[in-house]
Every structure is written in C-alpha cells, then in structure tokens.
Image (tube, rainbow, N blue to C red):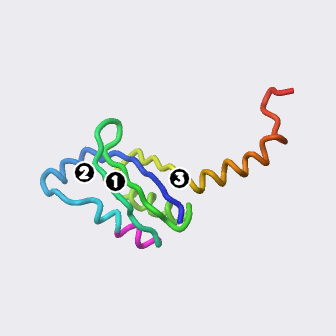
Amino acid sequence: MPTYITQGRYTRDAIKGMIVKPEDRADAVARLLSKVGGRLISYYLTFGEYDFLAIAEAPNDVQMAAALLAAGSGGGVTDLRTTVALTSIEAKGAFAAASDLAPSFRSAGGA
C-alpha cells in the first residue's frame, strides 16, 4: 500500500476544545483510515508551521483523498498537506526506470 505523510493545522476552535477536553486524535484518525482500508502508522504533535504530522497507508490515492476530505470537512483541521512517500526499495526502482528514460528526454530549452 502507498505511504502518505500528512501535515496540518488545528483550527483555533479545535485547540480550545482539546484544551477543555483533551483527546488522543490518533484514535480518530486511525478509525477514519480503517474505513477506507488504510491504517495509521504514526501520529505526532509537532512544533512550527504545522500542528501535527501523520504517517499512514491507504490502498490508493482516491481512498486517501476521501479520508482527507472527510477530515477537512469537520472544520477542526486546516491546511492539510499530503506527500506520497516511497520506500528506499521503491525509490531504487524509480531511479532504475529513470535511467532508461533519461537518455531520450530533452529538457526545456535544450538543443
């Protein structure tokens, strides 16, 4: 299954609510992902530009998009940013495939 890394921010109202009633958001995220056939690998509260980082697997981009859209529709998170991650073995395969393609590709502005 593809691996996805998602970063996002909590809304001000979400932060206020979780201060009043603390909760483990990893549980809710794990349940959501399981409904699309995925699984949560890890979930972190982070410092800096984003408030959280989640690493997850989902069957495909459509299922992951569905989970992200559902999460975003609740109004508690914003600025979701998701990246597909390749394992080192998958990356090696991509580099090998690129080595076959690169000689026939002409860069923009190239002669």
Q: Which residues are magenta?
A: 31-36
Can you name the residue that lies furthest to the left here? Answer: 20
Q: CA distance from mark 3 to mark 2?
A: 26 Å
The residue depicted at 82 percent of the width and 35 percent of the height is 106
Task: Please name the predominant secondary structure of the magenta segment in the image.
Answer: helix
Can you name the residue that lies furthest to the right here? Answer: 111
Q: Secondary structure at mark 1?
A: loop
User: Where does residue 42 sit, x and y in percent of width and height?
Assistant: 35, 58
| Precedes in sequence: disc 1 or disc 3 | 1
Q: CA distance from mark 2 to mark 1?
A: 8 Å
> In the image, what residue type sits under mark 2?
Ala
The answer to whether the residue labelled 1 contacts the one labelled 3, judged by CB atoms less than 8 Å apart, is: no
> In the image, what residue type sits under mark 3?
Val
The answer to whether the residue labelled 2 contacts the one labelled 1, judged by CB atoms less than 8 Å apart, is: yes
Q: In the depicted view, which residue is nearer to us: 12 or 52?
A: 52
Q: In the depicted view, which residue is nearer to us: 47 or 101?
A: 101
- Left or right of 46 in this view: 35: right
**Of the two numbered discs 1 and 3 in the rendering, the one whose residue sits closer to the viewer:** 3
Local crowd size for mark 2, using a 10 Å CA cut-off: few (<14), some (14–19), many (≥20): some
The residue depicted at 60 percent of the width and 51 percent of the height is 91
What residue is disc 3 on? 84
What residue is disc 2 on? 14
What residue is disc 1 on? 75
User: Where, quadrant-wise, is the C terminus in this rendering?
Assistant: top right
Q: Secondary structure at mark 3?
A: strand
User: Where does residue 84 sit, x and y in percent of width and height?
Assistant: 53, 52
| Precedes in sequence: disc 3 or disc 2 | 2
> In the image, what residue type sits under mark 1?
Gly
**Of the two numbered discs 3 and 2 in the rendering, the one whose residue sits closer to the viewer:** 3
